[in-house]
Amino acid sequence: MSENPASDHPTQRDGAGSGSASAVPAAPQRPKKRRFAGTVDQISGSLTFYKIFAFVTGIMLLILVAKMIMDYGFGYELYAGGNTADGAANTLGFHPKDSVVDGTGISYWVAVVHGWIYVVYVIAGFRLWYLMSWKIGRLIVIVLGGVVPFLSFIVERKIAGEVRREIDANPDAARRY
């Protein structure tokens, strides 16, 4: 080993070796402004997270709508456990309101669980929107996707397609760390 550590680097030797500076290709020119706010891996991970929660939010919203129809339309509630008014044991079933003794009304918990899943869905949508550097209108569409029944499935499909198309059309526009 030589006494000068800098001379161990192949581009700094005195003409010896094949690692001269002229053999290294020039770095590709980077765009002046990046199209995306994250790396392709960050965007792909965010898209996967968004897709999962768009699906889960859509399912929970459909369950919530069914619960509301049964509750407000027919006066039935989903109960777990307890005994019905005629003394029969209840495991899980729809019964008229207040007709099950010692049972737990599950309808309330469907609404609570949907609410928290929707919050995670909005966060997932916001992260994807931020990484893609989209305009605010796209975020509003994503947020509304979790409020209207069946819309989260349609919006998820549209957003996933747009993300893939934009990444394919701009392969060098993502950040590289």
Image (spheres, rainbow, N blue to C red):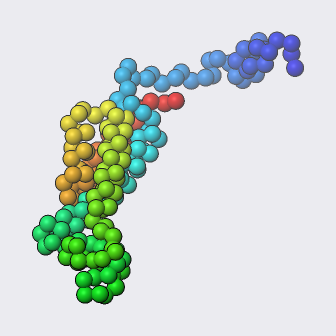
- Tell me: 49 left or right of 59: right
- Tell me: 66 left or right of 118: left
Residue drawn at the location 36% of the way across and 44% of the way down: 124
Closest to the observer, 4 or 54: 54
Q: Is residue 62 visible?
A: no
Closest to the observer, 173 or 127: 127
Image quadrant of residue 95?
bottom left
Residue drawn at the location 28% of the way across and 58% of the way down: 111
Closest to the observer, 14 or 108: 108
Q: Position of residue 108 (x, y in %)?
A: 28, 61
Q: Position of residue 110 (x, y in %)?
A: 30, 62
- Tell me: 10 left or right of 40: right
Image quadrant of residue 92?
bottom left
Residue at the outermost left position: 73
Where 44 falls versus 177 (above or below)? below
Q: Work out which quarter of the rendered image holds the N terminus and state it.
A: top right
Where 23 falls versus 115 (above or below)? above
Q: How many marks?
A: 0
Image quadrant of residue 163?
top left
Where 90 falls versus 131 (above or below)? below
Q: Position of residue 19 (x, y in %)?
A: 70, 22
Residue drawn at the location 15% of the way across and 72% of the way down: 75
Residue drawn at the location 40% of the way across and 50% of the way down: 48
Q: Position of residue 41 (x, y in %)?
A: 47, 41
